[in-house]
Image: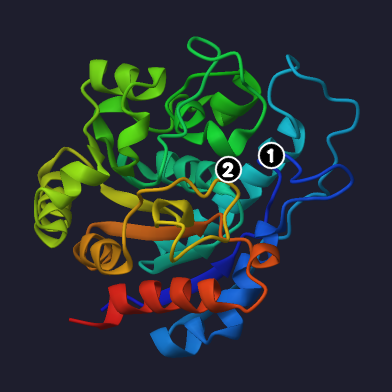
Amino acid sequence: MRRIMVMDAPSNLGLRPPAPGTVPGCYKLAGALRDNGIVRRLGAVEGGVVVPPRYDRGDWQEGDGVFNARAIAVYTRTLADRIEALVSAGHFALVLGGDCSIQLGAALALRRLGRYGLVSIDASPDFRHPGTSDRIGAAGGEELALATGRGQTDLTDLEGLRPYLRDEDVRIFGTRDAFVDDGDVAELRGLKVPVTTVSDLRGSDPADLGAATAENLGAAALDGFWVHLDADVLDPSVMPAVDSPDPDGLLPGELTALLRPLVRSPRCAGLNVTIYDPDLDPDGSAGVLMTDLVVAAFTAD
């Protein structure tokens, strides 16, 4: 078994403020999961912290593009340096976010190393871009579009490596059924990117879907794949501590069954965990659940 290296990426640069004068609390995710013993319970090795720049949208206004773009670009390169080093050394990188924009760091790191796929487990595809949406601004809701080369070049073409991911190397799971008529999902399906909704997943065995996806990506012309996990894929009845707690999400057993064969695949380079916000979890129960799910994916049968 490869060593699991746990690294913190506590960036909230890609989310809108939850209220005027505040900042998103997802930067506390890593600390909460650590308090619940994630490193010890996984028998993992300490990978350190990649400290993000300060959250400051300045005089940004709607229509100005992605806010915090310069800071996100700097952070993406720094995070990519650390992930690249871990993967190159043969370790499994477990990255504790943060908002979903941290996935750009993984995408850039793996693009430097070769051709990698992505399994995105998320309530929404995060595929907003100027070609289809006028609500551009929060990179945490646009990271898949940015990683596949759609959007402003200061984020999509770092180091001249655009795109970091090819469309055909992306697999999406957990999209809410209510979103299937949105432009993002329609465009993705038009691009032949597989989008598996909650009801699609429930119509099959999640474990079988995870295993088949790992096998499919393992057999493709890829050097491996990465898994992106957004806590909002879970139903708000069990995971209310996210910025967009949309109803009709996955239940814990479904998520664990899907995740387990993916992260256990020798072709999986790493996993990032995002969006859980301890500020929205006063009793800490959602953080305990998130920790238990990740640990179970690696350790339980």
Residue type, label 2: Ser
Left or right relative to 77: residue 220: left
Mark 1 vs 2, N-terminal side: 1
- The spot of residue 179 in percent (x, y) is 37, 30
- The spot of residue 285 in percent (x, y) is 54, 78
State the residue at coordinates (60%, 78%): 284
Towards the viewer: 18 or 78: 18
Which of labels 1 and 2 is toward the front? Answer: 2
Farthest top residue?
A: 131
Q: Is residue 135 above or below residue 55?
A: above
Towards the viewer: 290 or 64: 290
Q: Which residue is mark 1?
A: 72
Left or right relative to 293: residue 86: right
Q: Which residue is mark 2?
A: 101
Judge the density around disc 1: few (<14), some (14-19), many (≥20) Cα neighbours within 10 Å.
many
- Which numbered marker is on residue 55? none
Q: CA distance from mark 1 to mark 2?
A: 8 Å
- The spot of residue 1 in percent (x, y) is 25, 79
Q: Is residue 157 visible?
A: no
Q: Is residue 72 above or below residue 64?
A: below
Q: For numbered disc 2, what is the local secondary structure?
A: helix
State the residue at coordinates (83%, 35%): 57
Left or right relative to 50: residue 219: left
Q: Is residue 183 above or below residue 194?
A: above
Q: For numbered disc 1, what is the local secondary structure?
A: helix
State the residue at coordinates (17%, 37%): 221
- Please tell me in which quadrant of the rendered image residue 282 appears: bottom right
Residue type, label 1: Ile
- The spot of residue 144 in percent (x, y) is 45, 33
Residues at marks 1 and 2 touching, judged by CB atoms closer than 8 Å: yes
State the residue at coordinates (76%, 43%): 17
Judge the density around disc 2: few (<14), some (14-19), many (≥20) Cα neighbours within 10 Å.
many
